[in-house]
Image (tube, coloured by chain):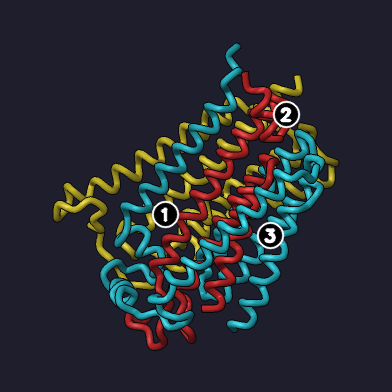
């Protein structure tokens, strides 16, 4: 896959950081504003996809990236499972128990375990979408050889 | 409000019919994108900002995937040869659709009308904001009241990603 | 009720595409349209006329009625699953194209050894 012109590359490199930060904001404020792990994770994955589309596939080392994102996805899923089952140990014997204090509704540090679940599922969705896209790009590179 | 929703839905149906009958695959994909972005406006009118945000991002990524697949291969829709078998298939499907429409009409009779949804569970969820502490009620439902469903969704996404990587690599080792 | 019927007409359009088209990409597009109509149907069932978005502002018990958050949460998970299944279907389609050189279902049936 070939990259685009210099103007597109430069603008994309500047814009991707903004999109990435916006995705992180959507993830961490998921319990206060519209959004959450799914929307924010898709935005973060979109930032990476835009970078690869504009700069061509030589910009990143594809195989290594794919291994890393696949590992990240598995790790995030295991972290969410551990957090869900730690409700069994803390307090009552309920899976998905919200054992942390609820806090004052409307502040950033509120909602018990919900923000942590949002962060883990955000990492998971971003890594999954990036893995799918990288697999497609690697396949295209292989058949064009 | 209902009129606006009906107009947008009408445009979405027209775009869907065009997407199915288009001669060029790329224009079919663009028409499908029209349906998806019309859905975003419907969600905003239905007071659902969460799913509107998710849908607008997911639709963009889906369009990127589809355009990448189509640009890689042929863009042409297959040449349509009108034969008797095709007419028979179309007639049978229209009959099937009419039967489905009849049963759908009977199924939605006991439902509440549009905009008159009874608040049996929703009040419990709205009061549950005091228990979970999350003022976004959708996040509270996702990760506290119905956490099992969301966990199952995460596992399905994981399985799909593993499946895509596996299918693309079938001949990679040879 | 008219809106429910129109939403089901969108679903029927997708079914018609799945039953009559022979191109694999067209079949994927039709399945996507069916998924869209399902999302819209669920979101419509939870709507309350004059209701607010399910995000409270400071107070715990809202003054105005909020729309039902449960169908919205279900749709939120369903959209991401739809993206994953779409990627899976496109992957299978592109592999079939590599093997047979066509998206036509009939030719794939004939060439199958």
Which residue is at 32% across, 59% downward? B146
Helix, strand or loop at label 1? It is: helix
Q: Where residue B109 sits: x, y (%)?
A: 42, 76
Tags 3 and 1 touching, CB below 8 Å: no
> Is residue C76 among what the camera can see?
yes
Work out whether residue C63 or residue A104 is closer to the camera in this orientation and state it: C63
Q: Which of B91/C112 is in front? A: B91
Answer few, some or many: residues within 10 Å of disc 2's Cα (few below 14, many 20 plus, some between 14 and 19): few
Q: Distance between the residues labelled 2 and 1?
A: 33 Å
Q: Name the residue under label 2.
A: A58
Q: Which of marks 2 and 1 is nearer the N terminus?
A: 2
Chain the render paints cyan: B
Q: Quadrant of residue B32?
A: bottom right
Front residue of this view, candidates C78 and A85: C78
Residue A50 visible at all: no
**Residue tagged by mark 1?**
A118
Numbered-mark total? 3
Residue beneath the point at 17% across and 51% down? A90
Label 3 element class: helix
Q: Which residue lies furthest to the left in this view?
A: A92
Q: Colour of chain C?
A: red
Q: Answer whether labels 2 and 1 touch (C-beta < 8 Å).
A: no
Mark 3 and mark 1: Cα distance apart in space: 34 Å
Q: Label for residue B16?
A: 3
**Residue C27 bears which disc, if any?**
none
Residue B22, placed above or below residue C68? above
Q: Do the residues labelled 3 and 2 touch (CB within 8 Å)?
A: no
Write down the colour of chain A: yellow
Give residue B68's position: percent from left, percent from top: 72, 40
Q: In this view, does B12 lie above or below B113?
A: above
Chain of the residue where label 3 is placed in the rendered structure? B
Chain hosting mark 1: A
């Amino acid at each position: 896959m070939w990259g685009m012109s210099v103007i597109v590359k430069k603008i994309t490199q500047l814009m991707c950081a903004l999109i990435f930060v916006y995705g992180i904001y959507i993830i961490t404020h998921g319990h206060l504003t519209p959004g959450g792990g799914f929307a924010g994770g898709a935005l973060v994955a979109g930032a990476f996809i835009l970078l690869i589309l504009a700069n061509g596939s030589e910009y990143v080392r594809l195989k290594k990236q794919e291994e890393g994102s696949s590992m990240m996805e598995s790790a995030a899923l295991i972290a969410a499972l551990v957090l869900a089952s730690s409700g069994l140990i803390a307090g009552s014997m309920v899976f998905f128990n919200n054992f942390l204090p609820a806090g004052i509704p409307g502040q950033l540090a509120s909602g018990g375990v919900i923000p942590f679940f949002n962060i883990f599922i955000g990492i998971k969705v971003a890594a999954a979408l990036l893995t799918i896209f990288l697999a497609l790009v690697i396949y295209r590179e292989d058949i064009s050889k | 409000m209902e009129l606006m929703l009906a107009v947008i839905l009408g445009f979405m149906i027209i775009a869907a019919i065009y997407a199915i009958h288009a001669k060029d695959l790329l224009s079919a994909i663009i028409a499908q994108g029209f349906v998806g972005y019309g859905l975003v406006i419907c969600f905003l009118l239905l007071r659902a900002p969460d799913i509107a945000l998710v849908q607008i991002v997911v639709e963009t990524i889906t369009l990127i995937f589809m355009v990448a697949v189509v640009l890689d291969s042929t863009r042409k829709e297959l040449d349509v040869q009108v034969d008797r078998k095709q007419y028979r298939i179309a007639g049978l499907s229209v009959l099937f659709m009419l039967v489905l429409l009849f049963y759908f009409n009977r199924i939605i009779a006991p439902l509440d009308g549009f905009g008159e949804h009874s608040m049996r569970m929703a009040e419990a969820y709205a009061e549950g904001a005091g228990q979970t502490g999350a003022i976004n009620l959708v996040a509270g439902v996702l990760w506290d009241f119905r956490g099992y469903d969301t966990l199952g969704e995460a596992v399905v996404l994981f399985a799909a990603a593993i499946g895509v990587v596996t299918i693309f690599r079938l001949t990679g080792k040879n | 009720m008219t809106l429910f019927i129109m939403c089901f007409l969108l679903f029927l359009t997708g079914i018609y595409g799945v039953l009559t088209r022979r191109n694999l990409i067209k079949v994927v597009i039709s399945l996507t349209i069916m998924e869209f109509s399902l999302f819209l149907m669920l979101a419509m069932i939870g709507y309350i006329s004059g209701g607010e978005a399910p995000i409270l502002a400071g107070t715990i018990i809202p003054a105005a009625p909020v729309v039902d958050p449960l169908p919205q949460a279900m749709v939120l998970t369903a959209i991401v699953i739809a993206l994953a299944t779409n990627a899976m279907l496109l992957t299978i389609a592109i592999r079939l194209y590599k093997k047979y050189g066509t998206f036509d279902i009939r030719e794939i049936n004939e060439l199958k050894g």
